[in-house]
Image (spheres, rainbow, N blue to C red):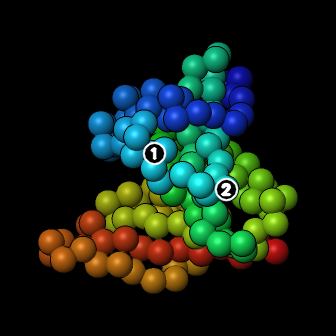
Amino acid sequence: MDLIIEIGTIDDVLLVNAFTPEFGQRHTQQSISARLNAKNSLILVAKIKGIAVAYKIGYALSKNAFYSWLGAVAPSYRRQGIANQLRVYQEQWAVNAGYSCINVKSMNRYPTMLQLLINSGYQIHGYQANEDDKYGENGKILFIKKLI
């Protein structure tokens, strides 16, 4: 697999989302731009043979904390370590940019992501319940990883 990770664009994100059933049309050019507006941000894209197959987006929460907001791998490219490679790249970028920690949120309905975070040294830092969620699938589990 000839995987290249590079700085990406919102268009790359939308291309991957078109093939990612978990996101579909939930995120638009406008919604992503609004979230990243006036923040120090990073969009990473993983490409194979020039085609975007995965991405990871993050932005500054503060001078010291970086938030890994959104990521996806197109279904036909999953279980090949791409998400992990994006995570490593993002963490190294954050260290080089002077951040001391990365914060992430995930949900019980994404067990593969939860395993990736825990296996990568992220620690559970809290939980945000969703009032409409009686089975705990849509509440957000907060993670933090100390970088330096």
> In front: 39, or 97?
39
Q: Which residue is mark 2?
A: 40
Tag 2's secondary structure?
loop
Q: Which mark is residue 32?
A: 1
Specify whether 122 is left or right of 97. Answer: left
- Residue at figure coordinates x 40%, y 40% from the top left: 30
> Tag 2: residue type?
Asn
Do we see residue 141 in this rendering? yes
Q: Residue 99, position in %: x, y?
A: 75, 68
Q: Quadrant of residue 75?
A: top left
Q: Residues within 10 Å of mark 1 (few under 14, many from 20)?
A: some
Q: Quadrant of residue 111?
A: bottom left
Judging depth in this view, the residue of 77 and 144 nearest the camera is 144
Quarter of the image with the N terminus in it: top right
Q: Is disc 2 in contact with disc 1, using a CB cutoff of under 8 Å?
A: no
Q: Residue at x 79, y 56 (%)?
A: 92
Residue at figure coordinates x 47%, y 75% from the top left: 142
Spot occupied by residue 29 in the image (x, y as percentages of width and height) = 42, 36
**Residue closest to the eye, 141 or 108:** 141
- Type of amino acid at the residue the image marks with label 1: Ile
Q: For the residues marked 2 and 1, what is the alpha-carbon distance in whole angstroms?
A: 14 Å
Secondary structure under badge 1?
helix
What is the x, y in percent for residue 105?
46, 67
The quarter of the rendered structure image containing the C terminus is: bottom right
Q: Decide if residue 129 is on the left or right side of residue 116.
A: left
Can you give x and y, in whole percent of width and height, for residue 66 in the image? 65, 65
Callout 2 crowding tier (Cα within 10 Å): few <14, some 14–19, many ≥20: some
